Amino acid sequence: MINQEVKRSLILSNEKSKKFDPSRREFLVTIGTAIAALGVGYAIGYLTKPAQIIERTITSLPTITGATTSPPPGTTTPAIAELSPVAQRAVLGIKKLIADGKISPGTTLRILHVTGSKAQLEKAIELWRKYVPEINIELVTQGTEPDVYTKAMNEAVTKSGSYDIITIFSTWLGDAVESGLAKDLTDYYNKYDPGYTGECAPIEPLGSYVTLYKGRRYAVDLDSDVFTLTYRKDLLNDPKYKDEFKSMYGYELKVPDTWEEVIDIAEYFTNKKLTSPRGGRVWGAYFYAEPAFAAYITWTNIFLEAGGILFDLNTMDPKIDSPEGRYAFNILLKLKPYMPPEALSASWADLYDKYIHGESVLTAAWPSLTKMAISSPDSVVKNVTGTALMPGVKVNIGGKTTIVKASPNPVNWVGIVDNYSKYPEAAYLFLQFMTAPDIGLEVVLSGVILDLFRKCWFTDPTYRSKAISGYGEDFVNIYMTAIEYSYPDFILRGGPEYASKLTTAVNSVLAGTLDPEKALSNVSSDWDSITKKYGVDSQLSAWRSLAQLFPESIKNVWRAKGYMK
Amino acid sequence: MPEKIPRSVAVLSSVPLNLLLNGVLIIPFIIMIYLAFIKWSPLMGIEWWRAPFAGISNFQRAFSDSRFIDSLGRTVLFTAIVVPLEFFIGLILAYILQKPIKGRKYLISILIYPLMLPPVVVATVFYLFFQPYGPVNNIFLRYIMGPSALDIYWFLNPSLAFITIIIADVWQWTPFMFLILYSGLSAVPRRLVEAAEVLGASGWTIFWRIRLPLIRQLIMVALILRSLEAFKVFDYIYVMTGGGPGTSTESVSLYIYRLAILYSDISYAAAVSLIVLVIILLVSRFAIRFLLERR
Amino acid sequence: MVRNYISNILLWLILVVAIIWTLIPVIWMISLSFKPYGEWRTPSLLPQKPTLDNYIMLFWPKSASVFIAYTALLEPITDSLIRSLIVSVLATLIAVIIGFFTAYGASRYNSPGPFTLFFTLLTRMLPPATFVTPIVIYYTTLNLLDNIIGLVLLYSATTVTYAIWILKGFIDAIPVEWEEAALIEGAKPLQVIFRVVIPLARPGLVVSGLFVFLMSWTELLFALVLTRINITLPVQISMYVTAVGALWGVQAAAALLGSLIPMIVGYLIQRHLITGFTFGLVRG
């Protein structure tokens, strides 16, 4: 009944609707489409001319403080002679390439990199332009490291030559080489000498382990990422705390030399329940344990100092399911109650945030932590930040008990040349130029994520005072030694995967969802499948070369334990 | 409608679609299928078309991969919780907003705001929300629970972490359901509603017996589309929990992402993706057949 | 009577709760976007020292004091905004137009048949991560990388299924008799579509258009992988989480700004959601 009526009224209103004027509609539609099409066409034209237009748009936006980048090229040509020999060779090298017709003036080289290094790369480009205005350098910036990794791997697959230089983590070097992405630079090293020997060389063992893979050079070092122990000088030197600590623990409150001391100090300060200026709780310690990527850093540090070796040097079997591995978990589990809970769940930047707001007493991270502590406007620990070597582990070597110290060097930016680039030699020369003793220091000091790596920056008075202006004297005093004690990241094919499996396990153990024994055996079998996936022989040869590049402090223990001959 | 389909309609309804889909998607899809049957990773240093044939070994590996199976189960659970929740809340809201309330347009604009943000941003906001220093612990729960609220560590407990993901997803996607249902309900002919009102039906009856059945097709569409998307949940987990603690909140999408992008294990990732695809295909085929073909 | 009253109050309550629930994260984001660096990780609802710095960072990066000594400064946000707008609008036009005709054919003439329709759902069933490498390989050969057209094609191809299914739902609800009547009276099929179906399917067009627009506007994964220099808005927003630490406040500001355009679109389309079923009032 209802339906009949409804239907009838529907049909009636249908009649009415058909009387809506069609021609006006059509007119509107036509005009609208025309305008839209014009707009679309214009916009496509505008935006498919990417680089120049965008640059124009950017420079035409008003800047409030009116910062300018560099003087227009061609005003003065500074004398090449005032450059360091390393940089001179690079500049002369590229001029020769241009003269020989191997690369034409006006060519643009592209660098794929992460936003964090933009300021520093722009500085390098600015300096380059002074001496080599004929060759342009263009930056292709990615937001985060995984994006750089993805693009790099895609480039390895498509071989398009869309980039000439890629800045990667040393951890990815194995992947970059084995996938055919990274060009072998050994011949260029020999031809142009980037200054890897002598008083101004990148500090060993870092200079070697970060650029060599299976004995050949595949990268140019841009950076160092060695961890140091950062501590609150004021709290550790306070006489009140010193007295109380001595009476409670039986030894002097001092900068910790071993992880056991770290636990004591952390326990002491955490129990004091101090508060930070912004009202937060002060924790005794904050070391990396987060799930996304950094938890493996702390664990591996303790493991290696205890004398553990990651893989057997004869068979490539994982050797983490060992007393040293258990010891590492032991320490971390004991340390956990004295670390903020965010250590297990927040991102790596949270460690920085807590420290500079005065909410942790002992911590460890990249050099940028010290930089931030002394110069960030929000830092409340500017004058009380002390630096020391990472705590070590007491090991019995040949009847004598020594404290073995080693510093992690996770990630570490290096520059590789895209194997499919049209101008590999020129690309390499830019890398040599920007890492030269003089240019390199300026680059490092203009930003955050690329840090000091050449020896003379610590030993030569002029360079050293510049370094101190950026990092503070305390830090500069210790950092060179830290680098000498540093060990490489997992610079193997599948490095990120090995590290990721370990990180997940460490985080699970600390979160209480996995027990250490199970974790060690799980990770061992995971690592084993990774190794088998790529071929034991190939992985073994890479591991053998890498193991030789570890610092003496660790190799000594390996030899003492018979892991290494 | 007449039996014979007019030429213009025939062309317009199939040619553009075919051009678009086949031109853009078919070839990459075929590449992906090929990748699943070979043993290849960019890290092997060989061309992908030269890589050795692997038969079904990738698929066999997937079936004994406990991390994969766990993530699958977890994702199914997630979808089963989230979609009905969003549907019912969306339905209630759509019902409420049928009434001519003042400022309805603004209210609707507010309600659909979550859709305007990239999921990554929403994930970031909720990530900050649930940190120990975030507002959830410090402001909201404090009122209810007092200072012990500060001891709740959302991301350290697998179940709590799971709840935070659900909350993020519900916040962002309930408006999707709401909008589809609301627009569907609004499109119901006024005639029918008014006729029913004249005949004395209550608001509730009108809703249940007239409006809802008319948009039943739309409801099914909404449920299916939303379920497909929910199954691919990625951003919230990636940003908020990192799959953690450990891998206890890792979804299928996140695991595949890690396999493909972080571990560069592309062949295996392709095989896993295909398995997931087939599972979803079968399930949705049955769901659609069962639900939609009751005309 | 009383039951009515109580249920009204209940419904009102639900609405209010829903509004508040929706607004809380938004308000927090707004407040975050006005907070200076030091306050990003604090729970306070309102900034103690509000600043415009985060917004300045979006347009004049070199002048913002946010981390000025530390961060790499990004490009101003205007370019990626414009690019996202173009990509989203184009993708929406393509997806909705193609979707509409496909939906119409499927609804009225069963062409394409149910199998093809189901097949289009495939584009939404695949977890995207593995699709990345194949599409990069494909686009490299076609030279469509870092190209707006490439993105538009990908977005419209992956969202057209939404348009088809939603529109089919709406078209199915339109009584067939009207078109049949028009056809009998001698109108050509295309005329019938344009004069009868489209006006009546307006809510469907508008809703599916909005969804496609939103999906293109907020899509991140493929934009990240397929663009190099010509980045879209979501990519730019993601870049505020840098290697030096996350600029939460700036990211919040960018996201809020980026949501303005969809908001405006969403508001404007609402009047189309009440359909033309109501014109032509019949009295009596």
Image: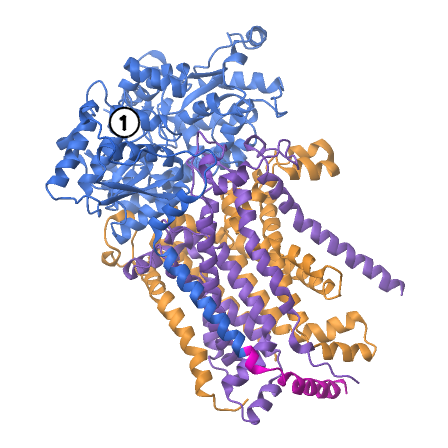
Chain colours: A blue, B orange, C purple
- Residue found farthest to the front: A75
Q: Write the start and end of the magenta stretch as one range.
A: A1-25
In the displayed structure, B30 sits above or below C65; it is: below
User: Which of the pair B106/C204 is nearer the observer?
Assistant: B106
Left or right: A49 in relation to B127: left
Q: Report the residue at 12% width, 36% height from top.
A: A96
User: Which of the pair B20/C205 is nearer the observer?
Assistant: C205
Q: Is residue B217 magenta?
A: no
Residue C134 picture quarter:
bottom left
Q: Report the residue at 47% width, 49% height from top.
A: C78
Q: Report the residue at 53% width, 12% height from top.
A: A234
Residue type highlighted by circle 1: Ile
Quadrant containing the C terminus of chain A is top left
Q: Give the chain of mark 1.
A: A
- Residue found farthest to the right: C1
Quadrant containing the N terminus of chain A is bottom right
In the displayed structure, C270 sits above or below C21; it is: below
Residue B279 in sight here: no
- Residue found farthest to the left: A100
Q: Residues within 10 Å of mark 1 (few under 14, many from 20)?
A: many
In the displayed structure, C136 sits above or below C74; it is: below
